[in-house]
Amino acid sequence: MTVSLAPAGTKAVPIYVLGTEDVALWAGQQSDRIRTWVDASGFKGGIGAVLMIPDEAGHPEMALVGYGTPASRRRDRFALAASLPKLAPGTYRIESGIEADQIEQETLGWLLACYSFTRYRDSAAEHPTLVTPEGVDPARLSILAEAEFLTRDLINTPASDMGPEDLEAAARALAKQHKAKITVTTGDALLADNFPMIHTVGRASDRAPRLIDLTWGSRGPKITLVGKGVCFDTGGLNIKPGSSMGLMKKDMGGAANVLGLAHMIMASGLDVRLRVLIPAVENAVSGNSFRPQDILTSRKGLTVEINNTDAEGRLVLADALTYGSEGKPDLIVSMATLTGAARVAVGPDLAPYYTDDDVVATSLDLSARRMADPVWRMPFHDPYEAMIEPGIADLDNAPKGGFAGSITAALFLRRFVSEHDRYIHFDIYGWQPSAAPGRPKGGALQGARALFESLPVILDL
């Protein structure tokens, strides 16, 4: 799905963006006809309020869009986008009311609000078009919106049409679009090539597990993105209850997010050597499912005691992280819908991340605010290392007790990268549970825009 802004200078209906405190002052500066129209309408400037004002011939002369109060705008990161459902189809330009430091964010929100998931039902509405505001790079914002739409489409697609082979097809399509290289290791070839835990998790499904390996770029620092591609998670033999299984089509949200981020990097032509690794599996139940109390040997040689087959994401990521680390990247990033503990800690809206590098964290936090992509730093808390050491094996995939679940999962993953690697781990939700301005209910990109914006600082580009 593509989306774009109209070129500057396109004929358009002017929009006046008014906060609740601005309406009376603005109306008092207008003609008697316009002031009377505004007063009669009851327009108060709340977020999402829209008032079309016709000229004397009845044609649209201007539109007023509510911008709420400063406090309400802090709750809605794309406040302008709340008006789109009430604006008639057509072309508009922002005449006034948005500060220069907010114009890019609000323009991006407008584009993101134009998303529709139409694979199974033609539900696409005709959205109003915005003229490119002054100081905004339309190509850049289109790339960001396309990346988000790619991620949303992948997550929103049910597992019946988004199994490991379908995720591979999506990666191949992205590679073809950007002239990237791609190789895929499938089925028993995973054992031959020493990816034992990816094979173990995915072997019970009739859809073969695989490791997708996409590379792009010939110069600059190396960045490796590793995305969890569990296309559906039953929980394995520790099977999930129905209430917990209902959203498991989104358990490949980490893979969808790294593909969205990869699109941003490649479409923008960043001077980096990019690698994307996606272990794509279905955690199913059959006679050859892996079992609680099994002990697996990873690609790195570390042994892992299985205390819950529903903690499978960290297993497939471990082999992929080891492989990625062998390439000695300048930065390695994992993104995964990994733990419910992260949701308990920060809810669905924040993307918690882990890093030992303060420069990375500072850059990410600043970029997150600029990009309206909220993140929250969590600790690699070394004293909890003992919680992931069961004694019978090197590592435990599901420590007992339930404490610090997101942290212990992150510590588990850190064991599989080189101690010299700059490493960031995102434990994302990948889902918007209820509609908000610019963010329809469904699959969501989280943390990727913030990371993309911070790469020039992190990698000294």
Image: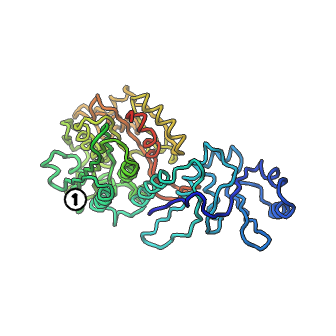
Vertically, is 336 above or below 83? above
From the viewer's side, name the closer residue of 375 and 109.
Answer: 109
- Residue assigned mark 1: 208
Residue drawn where x is 37% and y is 26% of the image: 382
Vertically, is 59 above or below 191? below
277 lies left or right of 403? left
From the viewer's side, name the closer residue of 227 and 217.
Answer: 217
Farthest residue toward the right? 32
Q: Return the x and y of residue 241 as percentages of the image width and height.
A: 39, 56
Vertically, is 380 above or below 316? above
The answer to whether one can see residue 283 in this image is no
Query: Which amino acid type is shown beneath numbered disc 1?
Result: Ala
The number of callouts visible is 1
Image quarter (top left, top right, bottom left or bottom right) of the N terminus: bottom left
Q: Return the x and y of residue 70 as percentages of the image width and height.
A: 69, 44
Residue drawn where x is 27% and y is 58% of the image: 285
Q: Return the x and y of residue 37 as percentages of the image width and height.
A: 82, 64
From the viewer's side, name the closer residue of 225 and 286.
Answer: 225
120 lies left or right of 374? left
Could you say whether the residue bearing mark 1 is in a helix, strand or loop? loop
